[in-house]
Image (spheres, grey):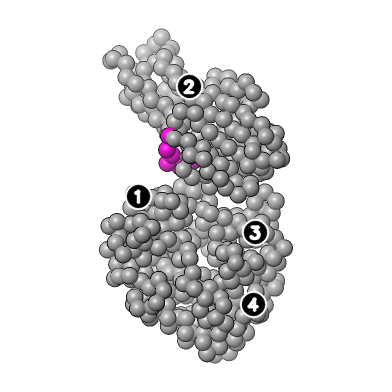
Amino acid sequence: MKNKKLFILSIVGVLMLVSIVVATSYAYFVANVSGNKDTNNVVVTNGVMALEYKDGDEINLANAVPGNSVTKTFTVKNTGNVATNYTIYFSELSNKFVDKTDLVYTLTSSDGGKSIAQTQVPSKNDAMVSNYAIEAGKTHTYTLTITFLNKDENQNDNQGVSFSTKVTINETKEYVEPTRFEMLGKTIESYEVATDDPDNNIRYTGANPNNYVYFNCSDYSNQSDSTCEKWRIIGVFKNMTKEDGFKEDLVKIIRDDSLGNIAWDSNRVNDWSKASLKTTLNGDYYNGTYATGAFKNDSTRNAIESVVWNLGGSSTFMDVTASMFYERERGTTVYSGRPTTWTGKISLMYMSDYGYATSGNSTTDRATCLSKALYKWFSASDCYSDDYLYKSGSTQWTLVTAGSITGVVVRSTGFVDGSSYSVDNRSVAVRPAAYLKSSISLSSVGDGTSNSPYQLKVG
């Protein structure tokens, strides 16, 4: 065989990772990962977990020779006050070995973790340790060893091949493949999306998913917090009708911060096609002359698609779930004489957008949240606190109406209210929402976190 080449092996976390230990703190029930610049995909059922890599966090194997072996050490710690279970698994695994039996791993622990005897490295994503218990305050130290076996036979078929993987933890008893979906010309892999609304649209869920994107930038060639605003990607919506009558799958975004508190309609008429807020958003705000956060240039304006927005209302709200809002928004129940659709560029989120954005948590799961009327979320903090569209301390307008003068809002306490806010109320926050043109694409920069939002190819 040729001269020995280096066998480079290191541990990778949930997404693109750095090799230094960065201490990060998150809310209860969300894991902290040292050495990983994002932790949203590392979730446990109870307590707070910490996963720390001792000397780097990337696994990439290329041009190894038989007999090479590398070990890496990491710890799993339950820093919470209750016991929990965890799963350690390979994710995003790429095993190009021709003879898969040549590559094996062992996992050992001497302080209560689960040891795994020599096992063939899988050819696809799989669990190493499944649903393993750890008591509050305890730490399990692991040593992972991956070996290219020397079989004393011709193994030339595995020369020059590659192997890569990521290693992470999750609370699930079995490894769950992350959802892969196409968004703005880029394949996105995420555990933080759901496709369970009636049209199977792809939606981000959770308290803080990796769905940040820079938008309304003064300089799209130099995107940063100082040149752009942070928006959130609500999801990919199927068969959206455009102004020209054609249909496409389009990405919907919403401004992360509000423009301030503004009346929905200063004349107290809840007809969006004539509303003063509609005129402001698609007039001064869109044209760049509005006092707060107006669009900065044509590059931003030209990135937005003009689409048909449904204006269906709801005659009730105290008994309406997310799926019921979704159907009513697309229905024909409106106050006498009001239109059921409006075509334009800038509007507001739907109430169903808010409802479907929850992930729930281990106490009240997503299915339970979606089965509850959104009005009753006032007694289900797990539903609204694990919903990135919720803003503590801020009541928000939606596009949904009730009766002749009322708007349906998301209250600052997390529940839906369709009776207390007439549309001329000036104490309700406005977060513009829009659909991006399908010609807009994502660059290779950014991972969707708040510290590194996705970047659009605009202009």
Amino acid marked by disc 4: Gly
Of callouts 1 and 4, the N-terminal one: 4
Q: Residues within 10 Å of mark 4 (few under 14, many from 20)?
A: many
Question: Would you name the residue on which mark 4 appears?
Answer: 418
N-terminal of the pair, mark 2 or mark 1, is 2
Label 2, label 1: how far apart the Cα atoms are: 31 Å
Q: Give the magenta-colored segment's residue range.
A: 14-19
Marks 4/2: CA–CA distance: 59 Å
Q: Where is residue 325 in the image (x, y as percent from the top left)?
A: 60, 71
Circle 3 sits on which residue? 383
Residue drawn at point x = 62 percent, y = 68 percent: 412
The quarter of the rendered structure image containing the N terminus is top left
**Quarter of the view holding residue 139:** top right
Label 2 sits on residue: 71
- Compared to residue 171, the image places residue 307 above or below, namely below
Does residue 118 appear anywhere in the picture? yes
Distance CA(mark 3)–CA(mark 4): 19 Å
Label 3 Cα crowd, 10 Å radius (few <14 / some 14-19 / many 20+) = many
Q: What secondary structure do most residues of the magenta stretch adopt?
A: loop
Circle on res. 445: 1
State the separation of the CA atoms marked 1 and 3.
32 Å
| Labels 3 and 2: the sequence-earlier one | 2
